[in-house]
Amino acid sequence: MKIKYLGTSAAEGIPALFCECEVCQKARLTGGKNIRSRCQLLVNDDLLIDYPPDSFYHFTLHHVDLSKIHHLLITHVHEDHFYSPDFEYFLRGYSHPKAGLPFTIYGSIDLKSDLEKYVNHPNNQGLRYVEIVPYKTVSIGKYLVTPLCASHATNHPYIYIISDGKKEFLFCHDSGLLKEEVFVYLKNNKHYFNLVSIDCNNGDSNEVEPIHHMNLDANIETIEKLKQIGAADTNTKVILNHFSHNGWHILHDDIKEKVSKYGFDVSYDGAEFEF
């Protein structure tokens, strides 16, 4: 499997809008991997995870072929992960997609109220919404996808297990420390992750947000618990993602050097990983 990080930041981006903190000023000056747009992931060129306001920019900059993508997973309804106004442009008159090729959005019941005005519109050209529920595996294209309950400040936030039948990975954003029920499910169903992409919004700060985001200490704790139940081991690739200028007070290369002793890698906009 291959994943590509189209965006890797928290809601305000890096450099953050209106911000003059040291990290943001350095990011503006140095550019490159220090410029981070809102989080979005592409799996094997045909499965998209989350839809931030930066999606148009992502698709253009990274030459994403939308004609290959018919499935979109949404983690939760915060605007930096689910910017629903863009789906108006799926209506007739705004775009001309290939006939008979639907675009299906999967997520919790929270998405319904925002999407139904487009799905039920007389000019809809194939946009669909499918509600999925925690701990129930569904077949989506060539993938098996299982939503798990995240610890985040919305009604029904999800993290996702994604498998192509050969490899399996855990997309763990946005979430604080995982609920015990998640570890019980993973252990009982004998899941093993070749890769874990994990929220590190709070960086190396001491700030603990059990229902919002993780910091580095929480990442270490989570990976260790996954190893204890057999869901990960030393061969599991761990990638830190979802960065905020408020969490880390250093730039990309320094973050990567700091976490390398734990065997962790660090995402950046445009980064690709095969596993």
Image: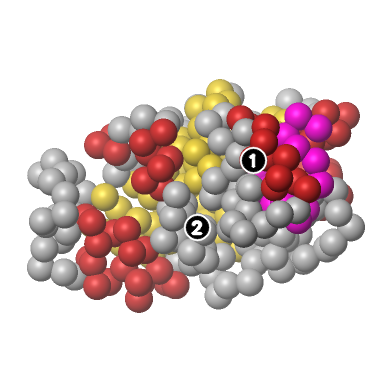
Disc marking residue 28: 1
Q: Is residue 134 visible?
A: no
* Foreground residue among 84 and 262: 84
Could you tell me which residue is drawn at 37 percent across and 38 percent down? 59
Looking at the figure, which quarter contains the C terminus?
Answer: top right
Q: Residues within 10 Å of mark 2 (few under 14, many from 20)?
A: many
Name the amino acid type tagged 2. Answer: His
Q: Position of residue 251 (x, y in %)?
A: 75, 37
Could you tell me which residue is drawn at 50 percent across and 38 percent down? 6
Q: Give the residues drawn in magenta, as a range.
A: 240-254
Could you tell me which residue is drawn at 26 percent across and 50 percent down? 103
* Foreground residue among 58 and 172: 58
Q: Across the whole image, how many numbered discs are drawn on residues?
A: 2
| 36 displayed left or right of 109 | right
Could you tell me which residue is drawn at 86 percent across and 33 percent down? 258
Per the model, the C-alpha gap separating discs 1 and 2 is 24 Å
Q: Would you name the residue on which mark 2 appears?
A: 81
| 112 displayed left or right of 180 | left
- Assign the magenta stretch its main secondary structure: loop
